[in-house]
Image: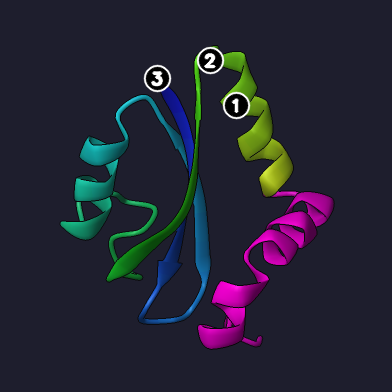
Amino acid sequence: MFYVYVLHSTRDWGLYIGYSTGLRRRLSEHKDGASRATGYRGPWNLIYYEAYVEETDPVGRERYSKSGGGGKLLRSQLRNYFAKHPLRTA
């Protein structure tokens, strides 16, 4: 399986959107600080993920999720979560 996932930092309240073929392994790397992209911003909470059978689907979804329109859709889908756990305001 191929996964797109969203993490929410409890340190700076920002988001990280990623793609992986091994979701549990990748989450462990984020939580252990082994990921260069997220090690300094943890701890992290997994707040959303999608699973795919074909590899090209999550690659496109990750790219879209990081765009302005994709971010807006994501915030809309997770509006109840963000009502309780707001994103950082910068």
| Alpha carbons under labels 2 and 1: distance apart | 7 Å
| Alpha carbons under labels 2 and 3: distance apart | 8 Å
Q: Residue at x 27, y 47 (%)?
A: 27
Identify the element where label 2 is drawn: loop
Q: Quadrant of the C terminus?
A: bottom right
Indicate yes or no whether the magenta region holds residue 74: yes
Indicate yes or no whether the magenta region holds residue 19: no
Q: Residue at x 84, y 53 (%)?
A: 69
Task: Report the residue marked by disc 2.
Answer: 55
Q: Is residue 15 left or right of residue 26?
A: right
Task: Inspect the image, locate mark 3, and give the three-letter code of the amino acid beneath it.
Answer: Met
Point out the frontmost of discs 3 and 1: 3
What's the mark number on residue 1? 3
Task: Report the residue marked by disc 1.
Answer: 59
Label 2 close to label 1 by CB (< 8 Å): yes
- Residue 22: x %, y % from top left: 30, 29
Identify the element where label 1 is drawn: helix
The residue segment tinted magenta is 66-90
Q: Is residue 17 above or below residue 19?
A: below
State the predominant SS element of the stretch in magenta.
Answer: helix
Label 2 close to label 3 by CB (< 8 Å): no
Q: Residue at x 67, y 37 (%)?
A: 63
- Residue 24: x %, y % from top left: 24, 39
Disc with the residue nearer the chain's start (3 vs 1) = 3
Q: Is residue 72 left or right of residue 80?
A: right
What's the mark number on residue 50? none
Q: Is residue 51 left or right of residue 21?
A: right
Q: Residues within 10 Å of mark 3 (few under 14, many from 20)?
A: few
